[in-house]
Image (cartoon, helix red, strand yellow):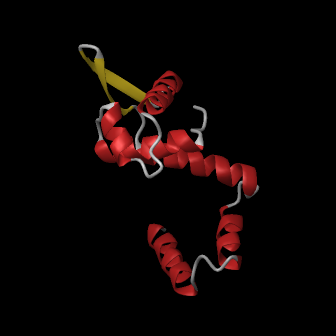
Amino acid sequence: MEKLTTKEEEIMQVLWKLKKAFVKEVVAKLPYPKPHYNTVSTVIRKMETKGFVKHEAFGNTFRYYPAILKEDYSKLFFSNAIQNYFENSYKNVVSFFAEEEKISANELREIIKIIESKK
């Protein structure tokens, strides 16, 4: 499965929250400046072609819903990021966040407790 574009991810986040939605409902939940209805409709149809979204028809109107769970996409996204940017090393990921001061020593201790409790 290919990666979503930034705009697709933004729309997918809305669909994951709403569970099922018509294009106008998606547009309403997007941040300002709001994209045009036709733009969102086109992006959603492309996402459907990629296998991320499905629809149910109500006459000429479609209600869209995610075809992939947010958790499954997150796993795919993070696996690819770790492989491509951190030499497939979770240690490198944690080190990166520690060096960037994005994770505290207390949070690291919590992570260690989680790991040790799995043993």
Q: Is residue 103 above or below residue 118?
A: below
Q: Is residue 107 above or below residue 77?
A: below
Query: What residue is shown at x 42% (from left), y 47% (from top)?
Result: 13
Q: How many marks?
A: 0
Residue most extreme to the bottom: 106
Query: What residue is shown at x 46% (from left), y 24% (from top)?
Result: 45
Q: Nearer the viewer, residue 54 or 32?
A: 32
Evaluate whether residue 46 shows in this view. Answer: yes
Q: Nearer the viewer, residue 25 or 77?
A: 25
Query: What residue is shown at x 70% (from left), y 50% (from top)?
Result: 83
Residue most extreme to the right: 87
Q: Is residue 110 above or below residue 16?
A: below
Indicate the position of residue 61 as horizontal and vertical percent values: 29, 20
Evaluate whether residue 72 shows in this view. Answer: no
Indicate the position of residue 64 as horizontal and vertical percent values: 34, 29
Q: Which corner quadrant of the image does residue 82 belong to?
A: bottom right
Q: Nearer the viewer, residue 28 or 12?
A: 28
Indicate the position of residue 63 as horizontal and vertical percent values: 29, 27
Q: Is residue 76 toward the left or the right of residue 37 in the image? A: right
Q: Nearer the viewer, residue 96 or 13?
A: 13
Query: What residue is shown at x 53% (from left), y 82% (from top)?
Result: 109
Residue most extreme to the left: 58
Q: Is residue 66 toward the left or the right of residue 93 in the image? A: left
Question: Quarter of the image containing the N terminus?
Answer: top right
